[in-house]
Image: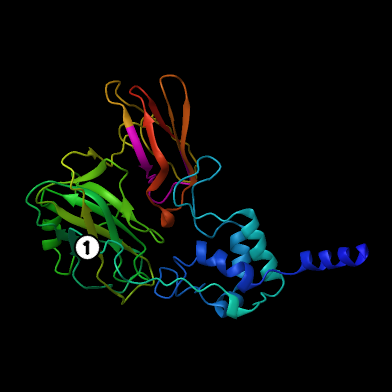
Amino acid sequence: GSAAVEQMAHAASAQAPTWADDVACVFFSHCTSCHHPGGISGEVLDLTSYDEAHAHRGDIRDYTEARVMPPWPPHPEYRSLAHERVLTQAEIDIIAAWANADGPSGDLGTAPPAPVYATEWSIPAPDLSVKMADYTIPSLSDDLYRAFVLPSGTTVDKWIKRFEVIPGNSSAVHHVLVYQDTTGQAQALDDADPDPGYTSFGGIGVSDAKLIGVWVPGATSYTAPEGMGIKLFAGADIVIQLHYPLGSDGSLDSTRVNFLYDPATFVRNLDISSPLEHLVSIVEPFLSIPPDQVLTFHEEYQIPAIFPATIVAIGPHAHLLCKHMKSYAVTPAQDTIPLIDLDWDFHWQGMYEFRHPIFLPGGSWLYGE
């Protein structure tokens, strides 16, 4: 009797995972926010479909085992961040075992329903909703970075509690930077270009513009922590910079941004600033990389003693040549606070939120390398 039980247990443990019982829920939880029809990667691979996932099971196994997918450049072991796109080792092993067993379906009638990615707004009644003019992406020989000016029409300052970016064409829009400009310079740049918007790499070409936020594939609406908000200045133009990747030629886009204001009369202002940057805080005299060399640069900045800071997110940025970035803080009591450690990938950049706001006493040092 015991031998029979042992044989049955061995058979059960050797049974391969199935789509219906084991694999679909992993894909639906971690992958289909991008890999669905109409999604940023839906044309490449639709993981809401068993047939399509089965047809690409070997590639899916290889990419997940290499941790190339889901794309998440930060190292979770250095600091665990909010909204992580990270598979556990157990989930990676399930995918591999399923693929190696030829991707059995199981009883598809009992499979969890595929998530539905509707086009409805997640902010159903925004206080401000602005949309760019219809834009047809021209023939491309390289990635296109295009900025569009969306007048806010506000007459008094407002506090943004929540905002969302709704790509007009999620298969063509790779990421979106959202700025506010009170100088009118962005509108002048737009007026000088006969087509909707104007081309601008790295930003919107306005030095005094303030970054409000970032949208990247898989992102949902952003909500400021309790008691905090982003100040939207009266009369500001909302300016969005969109990245259209090579291959999106001929696509039509009309991206929208929605804002929900905080009705409170006083909130703490969330400001996106760059205390660690290549002109002022870099320790080396100048950021210069000769051909065929790999160099490491260090940055440091001390928070003024009279201005303690609370940080809620971090957004590393290094354009095209960077390979690795790391940032941490050291308090006056010599406590080291890890912030982020990531392998830089220009195509998968974002604003990474901490799970909880981090308080840095005045006099703390910020370091980057």
The residue positioned 41% from the left and 40% from the top of the image is 356
Confirm whether the magenta stretch covers residue 313.
yes
Magenta segment range? 310-326
- The answer to whether any part of residue 205 appears in the image is no
Q: Position of residue 119 (x, y in %)?
A: 32, 71
User: Relative to residue 198, is residue 277 depicted above or below?
Assistant: above
135 in relation to 356, above or below: below
**Farthest front residue?**
1
- Residue 20 spot, x, y in % from top left: 61, 73
In the picture of the structure, the residue carrying the numbered disc 1 is 125
Residue toward you, 8 or 74: 8
From this viewpoint, is residue 1 visible?
Answer: yes
Say which element carries label 1: loop
Q: Residue at x 37, y 66 (%)?
A: 245
Horizontal and vertical percent position of residue 218 = 41, 61
Q: Residues within 10 Å of mark 1 (few under 14, many from 20)?
A: few
Residue 33 location, quadrant = bottom left
Q: Report x, y in % for residue 131.
A: 20, 66
